[in-house]
Image (spheres, rainbow, N blue to C red):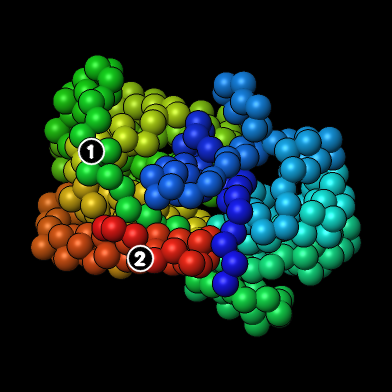
Amino acid sequence: MSVRNKIVLFGPYPPPYGGVAIYVSALHDFLEKFGLDCELKIYGEHSEPNENLVHPWFSSMYRNFRRLVRGDTCLDSSSFFFEYPSGRASIAWLMLKPLKRFRWVKVIHDGSLPTRYDNFGFKQKLLFKILIRFVDEFIVVSEDLHIWLRDIIRVKQKVSLIKSLLPIPPESFNAPLPVEIEQAIAHHDKVICSIGVFTPVYGFKDIAAAIESVRQESGLDIGLLLVDGSFAIDEDYKSEVLWQREWVTVVTNLPHPQVLQVLKRSDIFVRGVALESYGLSRVESLWCGTPVVATRMGETRGMLLYDYGDGEMLIQQIKEALFNPPMQNIRIWAERFECEAEDNLQAMLNILSPDRGPYDR
């Protein structure tokens, strides 16, 4: 089997610190650590100037990918082609892919894609169907996406299920927190954390309402710490979440090691999202020894579950996690997820560098 030349990672990169950006960042670090020839291409907006920043424009796509050659691999975690099809980006890609003949491995992270695909317009579906023919191999991060791609879309290429959970270096769990976050945590009897953005799909409003109920019933000063990824915002929704709730603290674009420290210092982590393909933050919370209350989406093992929008069940599970945390169960699942993360990384290495042996764990 021939050795691949270059690996190009194409996707979001922190900040902002969304799950896919953290995945791309972690994978990039591992590939460099293992000595593979890896180049990073960042899509979308970015807070700092970067020569590898890619926009969904014809010129930007062409400039960034025209040097790829046969034998190179593009591991694509972007949303330009299938999740949110861009005509200008797609035209450039449709010119470059047959001409340069590089290997295109498309990673689909977006658990909402099967639902949204039915509402695509004619042009979006046409782009989707044309582009699918040029993909060499698919990777999906959930069983639902795997079933949808194989049984509903009926792609003919290989589809690998590799969840987005990757190992985290032990030192990443020991980052110091800014003084203002330390003070916010110390100020309350209990602290509950949630991660997402201020749009209804992430459930911040439901979480705040549930905690308000538990505060009133228990008499405890329970604080809510919202880690805002800032990649989307509904200002009216944000106002509703924060209205007359001085016990809610919002932190924005927190670096991943500091997020892990917040999870470690919280009494509960609540993931209230309506749609989830996997949910890295859920598992990271278990790794930090923190009970997880989460919707029945994505990864759910070892967690206290509720249905999105079911406020009464959310309240019940928050009380269970606060006053009767299943610590032994958390430890068991944390260890299992550590093994799965190592397996996921090895599976990615097998796809990106098939001639390479097992990495040293």
Residue type (three-letter) at the residue carrying disc 2: Pro
Q: Mark 1 and mark 2: span between their CA atoms?
A: 23 Å
Q: Position of residue 284 (x, y in %)?
A: 30, 50
Q: Position of residue 168 (x, y in %)?
A: 31, 48
Residue that carries the numbered disc 1 in the rendered image = 171
Q: Is residue 211 left or right of residue 112?
A: left
Q: Is residue 78 left or right of residue 202?
A: right
Q: Earlier in the sequence, mark 1 or mark 2?
A: 1
- Name the foreground residue: 45 vs 133: 133
Question: At 36% from the left edge and 42% from the top edge, which residue is drawn?
Answer: 194
Q: Is residue 139 left or right of residue 66?
A: left
- Name the foreground residue: 327 vs 161: 161
Residue type (three-letter) at the residue carrying disc 1: Glu
Q: Report if residue 124 is visible in the image.
A: no
Q: Secondary structure at mark 1?
A: helix
Question: At 27% from the left edge and 65% from the top edge, which residue is drawn?
Answer: 339
Residue that carries the numbered disc 2 in the rendered image = 358
Image quadrant in which you'd find residue 3: bottom right
- Residue found at the very far top of the displayed protein: 179
Q: Residues within 10 Å of mark 1 (few under 14, many from 20)?
A: few
- Name the foreground residue: 46 vs 349: 349
* The C terminus, quarter of image: bottom left
Query: Viewer-nearest of labels 1 and 2?
Result: 2
